[in-house]
Amino acid sequence: MTTISRRTFMLAATAVGALALAGVAIAEVPKLEQKDKYKVGFAQTESNNPWRIAQTNSMKAEAEKLGFQLVYTDAAGSAAKQVADVNSMIAQGVDVIFLAPREEKPLIPAVMAAKKAGIPVILLDRSVDPSLAKAGEDYLTFIGSNFVEEGKRVAEWLVKNANGKSKIIELEGTTGSSPANDRKKGFDEAIKAAGGFEIVASQTGDFARDKGRQVAEALLQAHPDADVIYAHNDEMAIGAIAALEAAGKVPGKDVLVLSIDGGKEAVQAVVDGKIAAVVECNPRFGPKAFETMMRYAKGEKIDPMIINDDKFYDASNAAAELANAY
Ligand code: GYE
């Protein structure tokens, strides 16, 4: 290791600070010192579903295993609170911030504030607007699923297994979130390319069970001939099943329900024939998140995107896979 005098270090630090003050963007992610123990922030977006809880548990378990201090916050579904949470982590002097940004644009100031404070940010599961913040520059990397691909896999399953069903209601995730944007893009494009299908309505259910149920109920009334429901996550799919049953329709028979996430309750619904197919979105981030941060501290080059592997469940494998679902 090269040793530099304190004076040289201070001069360099002042120069960087001056550039930042002058509004000149510094094109580098802050460095991370190699240490035995770290104080790490994890800014969760909300905790209203099994996917979020599985993700939080995975992060907490890994921090505990490594003996790292975890500063955990839950933004309770508010992007504004999540920005405040990140600012509070900065004030507490965490070494790294793991951020699951609720929406693509509103979390940009949080990413930039951490960068300015010299704290590397790793985005978990959701991303930010790529025209406003860049991996390898403003934050270290994005770890998560390929959401466009998830939507496309649902569409491809439908094209093969539709059996004449063709009128689709789409329940979108949280408006402005990267999984909602990309799951829509992947699905809609593949459905359009296949031809013969029609998306009769597409509306947000905010990734939430009861909102999904309410929206499905209203859309089923407006489009009684709809025979497919594509939900951007399990919670809304389960809400849609309740809406179908309340309307006297049989999910799996009258209407095919398709979903993304692959939690236990949804995989059980596949076993029961109520959900036709689910693309898994893996919530077990802990090991990969902490391993990535330590590789960075060692000086390794980190890819701008680290993509998780997702399984696929339908009637052919759901019973056998049930025990492995989160
Ligand atoms: O599908 C959903 C959660 O960002 C990938 O957010 C995640 C999604 C997940 O609330 O259930």
Image (cartoon, grey):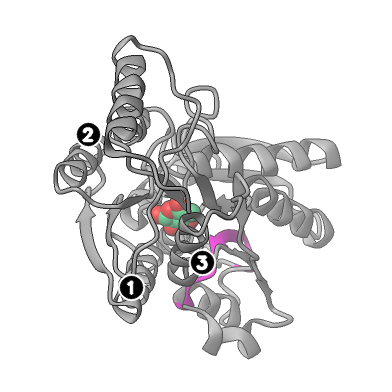
- In magenta, the rendered stretch is 252-264
Residue for badge 3: 288
Q: Mark 1: which amino acid?
A: Asn
Where on the image, by quarter, is ligand 1? Answer: bottom left
- Closer to the N terminus: mark 1 or mark 2? 1
Determine contact: label 3, label 2, CB under 8 Å. no
Q: Secondary structure at mark 3?
A: helix
Whether disc 1's CB lies below 8 Å from ligand 1 is answered no
Q: Amino acid at mark 2?
A: Ala
The residues tagged by marks 3 and 1 sit, at their Cα atoms, a distance apart of 14 Å
Residue 19, percent from left and from top: 36, 15
Q: Is residue 197 magenta?
A: no
Instruction: Give the class, few, some or many, for how many residues have Cα within 10 Å of label 3's Cα (few <14, many ≥20).
Output: some
Q: Would you say the residues marked 1 and 2 are in contact, meaning their CB atoms lie under 8 Å apart? A: no
Q: Is residue 258 magenta?
A: yes
Residue pictured at 50% horizontal, 72% vertical: 266
- Let me know if residue 195 appears in the view: no
206 relative position to 318: left or right: left
* Residue 50: image location, x then y, percent: 37, 69
| Near-viewer residue (268 or 112) | 112
Residue to which mark 1 is pinned: 57
Query: Crowdedness of circle 2 by 10 Å Cα count: few (<14), some, many (20+)?
Result: few
- Look at mark 2 in the image and give the residue it sits on: 80
Q: How far apart are labels 3 and 2 at the CA level?
A: 27 Å
Which is nearer the N-term, disc 3 or disc 1? 1
Label 1, residues with CA under 10 Å away: few <14, some 14-19, many ≥20: some
Return the residue found at the far top. Answer: 22
Q: Nearer the viewer, residue 2 or 82?
A: 2
Q: Say which amino acid is labelled 3.
A: Lys
